[in-house]
Image: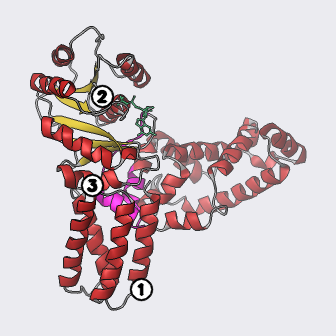
Amino acid sequence: MFDTLSDKLESVFKKLRGQGVMTEDNIKDALREVRLALLEADVNFRVVKEFVEKVREKAVGTEVLHSLSPGQQVIRIVHDELVALMGGAGNNELDLAAKPPVALMLVGLQGAGKTTTCGKLGNWLRKQKRRPLLVPADVYRPAAIEQLKTVGRQLNIEVFDSNPGQNPVDIAAGALRFAELNGYDTVLLDTAGRHQIDDFLMGELERIKAATSPREILFVADAMTGQEAVTVAGGFHERLGLTGVILSKLDGDAKGGAALSIKAVTGTPVKFVGLGEKLDALEPFHPDRLVSRLLGMGDVLTLVEKAHAAIDEKQAERLHQKLKKNQFDLEDFLEQMQQIKKLGSLESIMGMIPGMGKMMKEMKGAQPSEKEMKRIEAIIRSMTPAERADHGIINGSRRLRIAKGSGTTVQEINLLLKRFTEAQKMMKQFQKMGPKGLLKGMGG
Ligand code: GDP
């Protein structure tokens, strides 16, 4: 996400980091590059202008802190101002503090990702121990209602029963009554979209708003459309008074312009980002973490949170016992690989470790790749349970059989077993730590 922008900013800052003395001239040079990088990333030009001006004033005007070099200080100002640009570190949480059922309304253009996001948000809310009800209120797009029902089935979340013959305002109002009677505390209204803003649609959305008093009106914006998304958000905000934005499709090659300008232009903060088509690919948006990633500082907090969420406590405890007794075998190894996969793609995880994103780019090939992980998995899956439990019994003929079964070579099996033996030795050293010892070491 935002690779080009991130590369550019990193290279500006690399130069700055080394500067012992900052003059107005080299601040000016650096800021010119920052300006270009932001414009190229499709950030609104007025936003860029104001941003650069603010940073320049602060950079020239502030006293140099003892703990930072002058170059680092400029980086810090840019960091803080970028965070402020996107709404600061705090106010991006959903407002659910009302007597249930709380209504949340999703609005946006057709194809922006509303229906998918409705499911993702329901899934996320359920993880927060809430009881969501999904409500299809798009009676115009053929199959929109059916699409949300399918999403609900996949997630095992209830979908309010509506049909294309009904009035969307009646559907929304009926869904709230249904939620109240049946103990659903959060009602997610998936409304109709058009290819562009039109009066009829806005009028209908206003009536749904009046009928349901939603606690949040969330505009779902396709990040790939850049400034267009910002303009459309402005149009919706004027008529409806948005409370937040959900940026979908940030996993694609969105340049970042929408994420960086939407708050400054519309006054509405981004609250969530969609990072894939799968129904768990939604994350709360933290400007400070995104900026850290953009500036190549990593995002350890998200990594630790993801790790905590993915770790199965019982499994972790069982693993701990096995480690203690020195019984960690290839079956456990495979299990651990599955756990790591739950965190996301290897590349996205690595990008959260400070400095690692860059290193990965520089060392392509020398890194364990997803492909290599798949081969290792295939090898272990071709072993019998007895072999997984005690790899010492894997002799020459067994190696040949495993290689054939997994479509790999004996050399690869040899290498895997060698590495695993080394890993076992290393794990003995971790035995004294608790099941989450490693994570604790990372600050989790
Ligand atoms: P709607 O018309 O606004 O309801 O849009 P849909 O929910 O039907 O989504 C349109 C398309 O975008 C679908 O193919 C979704 O799978 C896809 N989509 C939605 N969110 C994301 C996302 O975060 N990442 C990616 N890659 N695709 C997404």
Q: CA distance from mark 1 to mark 3?
A: 30 Å
Instruction: Mark 2: give few (<14), some (14-19) or many (20+) Cα within 10 Å.
Output: some
63 above or below 424?
below
Which of the 4 quarters of the picture holds residue 176? Answer: top left
Taking the image as four quarters, which one is ligand 1 found in?
top left
Queried whether the magenta region covers residue 280, the answer comes back as yes
The C terminus is located in which quarter? bottom left
- Can residue 344 be seen here? The reply is yes
Where in the figure is residue 348, as x and y percent of width and height? 49, 53
> What label does residue 18 carry, if any?
1
> What label does residue 194 carry, if any?
2
Q: Is residue 346 left or right of residue 30?
A: right
Span highlighted in magenta in the image: 279-305
Instruction: Mark 1: give few (<14), some (14-19) or many (20+) Cα within 10 Å.
Output: few
> At 42% across and 54% down in the image, what residue appears?
303
> At 12% across and 23% down in the image, what residue appears?
207
At label 1, which amino acid type do we have? Gly
Q: Nearer the viewer, mark 3 or mark 2?
A: 2
> At 46% across and 45% down in the image, what residue appears?
311
At label 3, which amino acid type do we have? Ser
Q: CA distance from mark 3 to mark 2?
A: 23 Å
Q: Nearer the viewer, mark 1 or mark 2?
A: 2
8 above or below 100?
below
Which of the 4 quarters of the picture holds residue 132? Answer: top left
